[in-house]
Image: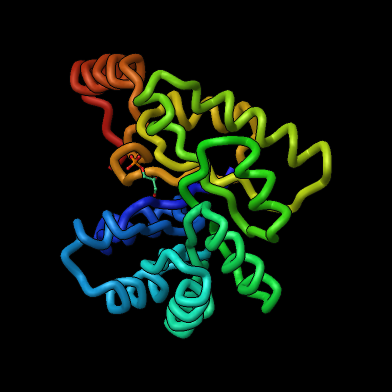
């Protein structure tokens, strides 16, 4: 499973990238706003930092302007993926851009039927939002499972990019269900390392190292 980082914070991306944890980056207007940076400038820096796809989202809601914005975003770097919303216009923009050989991430997916449409429009990635479904007491993981089944039934190449990932359990469930990619905030990715028994075991080892004065260097 690939790990994308869901942030526009350069330092956080760099830290995870140095450890080989970054297969790509996703941004959205809210993350750009949070960064306080110009979208073109910050996206250019991210693209220079990581080798994998970097999703940059359009701001328009009509297909024609989305396509024009997508083409401008694509000028930033070779690893840009244009992100469009899952609307009829977004699907039109997706089809036009993927027909030209570009990568497109169709975002704000909340149903398997939406994911089916995105795949038929040639989407490179579909982004189902797990956490936001959980927020309204719906089952985000059921959506991942349904999309996996449908894409496998018909051999769609569109990759399932599970988004709105909020917890370690979301990551684990996505891995179990066969999501191709998860995109998560840096803190969620870093928290995957935590286990109380690791902390407890290390504390016991450290006590014995001290008691026996064990030295290597
Ligand atoms: O990038 C889109 C998605 O990951 C946002 O997550 O936590 O704002 O629902 P969240």
- Residue located at (58% from left, 24% from top): 142
Q: State the image coordinates of residue 72 (x, y, percent, origin top left).
A: 44, 83
Q: Say whether residue 167 is left or right of residue 42.
A: right
Q: Position of residue 111 (x, y in %)?
A: 57, 35
Q: Is residue 45 left or right of residue 61?
A: left
> Which is nearer the eye, 43 or 28?
28
Q: Is residue 61 above or below residue 212?
A: below
Query: Is residue 99 positioned above or below 191 on the image?
Result: below
> Which sits in the foreground, 186 or 106?
106
Residue beneath the point at 66% across and 29% down: 146
Counting labels gives 0
Ligand 1 picture quarter: top left
- Viewer-nearest residue: 170 or 123: 123
Quadrant of residue 41 in the image? bottom left
Quadrant of the image containing the N terminus:
top right
The x and y percentages for residue 4 are 46, 51
Q: Which of 105/93 is in front?
A: 93
Question: Is residue 21 placed above or below 75 in the rendered structure?
Answer: above
**From the viewer's perspective, is residue 10 above or below residue 172?**
below
Displayed quadrant of residue 160: top right
The residue sitting at 38% across, 33% down in the picture is 132
């Amino acid at each position: 499973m690939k790990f994308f980082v869901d942030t526009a914070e350069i330092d956080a991306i760099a830290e995870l990238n140095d450890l080989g944890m970054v297969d790509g980056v996703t941004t959205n207007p809210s993350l750009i706003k949070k960064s306080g940076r110009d979208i073109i400038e910050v996206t250019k820096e991210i693209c220079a930092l990581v080798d994998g796809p970097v999703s940059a989202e359009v701001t328009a809601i009509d297909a024609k302007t989305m396509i024009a914005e997508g083409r401008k975003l694509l000028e930033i770097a070779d690893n840009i993926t244009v992100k469009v919303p899952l609307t009829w216009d977004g699907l039109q923009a997706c089809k036009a851009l993927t027909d030209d050989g570009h990568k497109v991430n169709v975002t704000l997916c909340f149903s398997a039927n939406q994911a089916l449409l995105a795949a038929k429009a040639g989407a490179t990635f579909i982004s189902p939002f797990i956490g936001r479904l959980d927020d309204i007491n719906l089952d985000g993981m059921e959506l991942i499972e349904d999309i996996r089944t449908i894409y496998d039934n018909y051999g769609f190449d569109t990759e399932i990019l599970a988004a709105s990932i909020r917890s370690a359990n979301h990551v684990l469930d996505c891995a179990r269900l066969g999501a191709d990619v998860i995109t998560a905030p840096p803190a969620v990715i870093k928290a995957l390392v935590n286990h109380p028994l690791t902390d407890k075991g290390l504390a016991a080892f450290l006590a014995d190292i001290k008691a026996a004065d064990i030295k290597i260097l």
